[in-house]
Image: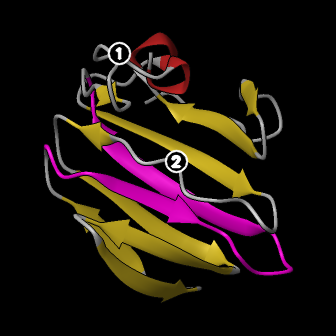
Amino acid sequence: MPVISGATAPVFTLPHVTAIGLAAPSRGAKETCAWRFTVAPGTPAAEHSVDREEVFVLLSGGAIATLDGVEHPLVSGDALIVPPGTPFGIANPYDEPLEMVAVLPVGGRATMPGGEPFVPPWAQ
C-alpha cells in the first residue's frame, strides 16, 4: 500500500486556494482521490458541479457552502456531501484560513459554468 507523505505531496496553487494532492491515480490510487485544501480568508465561492459524489470534511476554520442555491454554514468537524450534477460552491468569508479534505472517485470530473468537464489536476 503506497504512503503519500503530506510533506512531499504535489501542491497546486489557484488564486486564494492551495490543494495538496494526496490519493490519485498518479500516486497509486485505483478508486478514490483525496486532497487537502487551504482556502484563504475572504474567498468567495466558485460555483461548479461534479459528475460523481464528492465529500468534504472541514478540519479547521469555517465555510459557507452553497448547494443547489441553498446556503449551509459549516464549521470544523462538519462534512458536506455533494450529489453528482448539483451546482455548489464553498466560500470562506471568515478571518481564518479554511482547511478541509475532499474525496472524489477516480475519474470524477468538475464543470465550471459554461465550461467543459475536466479532471482537476490534483485528482489525476
Residue 46 numbered mark, or none: 2
Point out the tag, 1 or 2, that comes first from the N-terminus: 2
Q: Is residue 114 above or below residue 57?
A: above
Residue 49 on image: x %, y %:
28, 41
Q: Mark on residue 90?
A: none
Q: Nearer the viewer, residue 40 or 59?
A: 40
Using the image, determine if residue 33 lies above or below residue 81: above
Left or right: residue 6 compared with residue 106: right
Single out the residue that lies furthest toward the front: 114
Pick the front one: 68 or 25: 68
**Amino acid tagged 1:** Phe
- The percent position of residue 5, horizontal first and vertical second, equals 71, 37
Disc 2 on helix, strand or loop? loop
Marks 1 & 2, CB-CB < 8 Å contact? no
Disc 1 crowd rating (10 Å Cα; few below 14, some 14-19, many 20+) is some
Query: What's drawn in magenta, residue-wise?
Result: 85-106
Callout 2, which amino acid?
Answer: Ala
Question: Alpha-carbon distance for marks 1 and 2?
Answer: 15 Å
Which residue is identified by label 1?
118
In the displayed structure image, the side of residue 5 where residue 104 appears, left or right: left
At x 71%, y 69%, the residue is 98
Q: Residue at x 54, y 42 (%)?
A: 35
Q: Position of residue 94 (x, y in %)?
A: 76, 81
Report x, y in % for residue 50: 25, 38
Label 2 crowd bin: few (<14), some (14–19), many (20+), radius 10 Å: some
Going 13% across and 46% down the picture, which residue do you hit?
84
Quadrant of the image occupied by residue 9: top right
Residue 100 falls within the magenta-colored stretch: yes
Instruction: Indicate yes or no whether the magenta region holds residue 81.
Output: no
